[in-house]
Amino acid sequence: MKSSIPILLLVLLSGTWLPSAVRAGDAADKAAALPQGSVSLAEAFALVLERHPSLQIYEFDRRAAEARVLSALERPNPELETEIEDVLGSGDFRGFDSAVYNVGVSQLIELGGKRRLRGEMARYRVSETELSYEAQKRAVLAETAVRFVDVLETQRAEADARATEDIAKEALDNVSRQQDEGRASSLDVAQSEIAVEEAKVALENARLQGELARQRLASLWNEEATFDSAQGELLPPAAAAPMLEDLKLACEEHPRLRLAEAELSTARSGLELEVAKRTPDVTAGLAFRHDSPSDDGALVLAVSVPLPLWNRNEGGIAEAEAVRDRQAASVGLARRELEMAVVSAYAELRAARAEYASVTGKLIQAAESAYDSTLEGHRLGRFTYLELLEARRELVSLRARKTTALGKYHRARVTLESLTGRDLSEINS
């Protein structure tokens, strides 16, 4: 079955990117089963989203951030105050007979919008947590797709190695028949046997590389590889690539950039809060006063306001301004880093596509034709075994280059679609 890896990756990276069976909210109700036999990219994504360690912690971070919003919006508690005056002295003030009792409450009244600004900052922190999760999720899904491509590439490389072994065995049979007919030497047979052994070693190496690629994929969901193959195959590169400037513009919605912008908004609110702290808060109090000697009572009203003579929070404001400027610079840095990542992946995409076009254009067809002609000529005694060996090596080399170019192309495409959040075919060429 053929599958387009980048298009499926795009579906999973879009705003409504998950089917209900693998949404994070449904993970507790329906756990993704470990794949047996073969694994699809959708199954790999479901397992990673459910089990990847870096994604599991974000639910706790979100809950903590939402709890901080509640804390930020809470008003200061009132204070109960009790005073006893004119006691334990001398003369008329001996004992408690002359005591004056004050019992009251006081309340801090915040001015300057401090409570609103604290809540605003806490809400921005919630947005930061969500965007941080989105950025990490996109990175994890992209890494999953890249490792899935690695598995498909090793499967293709193993198939090429198996074909090479068949070619080597066919050449050995041909040389052995020629030796029986007196047209080939024992040296030719020995070289053919060596070529078969080399092909077997190459095939075993390809199998081991496949096992490693499958284990690297399975490690993303913290398990051993329970599958023996990946569904799909590496499709040929698209005929045309989008313009680089269009790709740069498309990465403006990347969660990493949006996270930097959210952190800038938080820093701006933090600066507003520090400026608001210059406005003194008022503490208002109400108490009941009882005078023991006269047995009279009265109300006591109290208001206190700090005088901002020495501390006008210049240090806090200066620090908040520095944090704001730093975050503003971080937005530009995030944008430049994303653009550079796009430029790098775009160069790799074009280079891999050019390599694939070069190999599959005339080179591999010419190599296959040359090998067939050399093999037939060798059967008829027109070519030596060394000439046959050279033709085979050239064909094997070109097949390996074709597979490597396909792997590089699809890895670069996955990276670009992860950075832009869009299918490359939908971006204007």
Image (cartoon, rainbow, N blue to C red):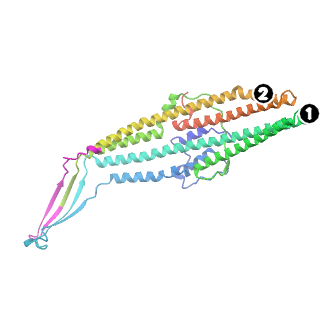
* Span highlighted in magenta in the image: 287-316
Name the residue at the right extreme: 181
Q: Which mark is residue 49?
A: none
**Taking 101 as reference, is 404 above or below it?**
above
Which of the pair 251/151 is nearer the observer?
A: 151
User: Would you name the residue on which mark 1 appears?
Assistant: 182
Q: Amino acid at mark 1?
A: Gly
Is 348 on the left or on the right of 367, as rendered?
Answer: left
The dot on residue 370 is 2
Of the image marks 2 and 1, the number of the one nearer the N terminus: 1
Residue 327 point in image, percent of width and height: 38, 39
| Crowd around label 2: few <14 · some 14–19 · many ≥20 (10 Å) | some
Q: Residue at x 76, y 37 (%)?
A: 164
Question: Can see residue 14?
Answer: yes
Quarter of the image for residue 403 reads: top right
Mark 1 packing: few (<14 Cα in 10 Å), some, or many (20+)?
few
Q: Position of residue 336 (x, y in %)?
A: 46, 34
Q: Secondary structure at mark 1?
A: loop
Q: Position of residue 396 (x, y in %)?
A: 73, 34
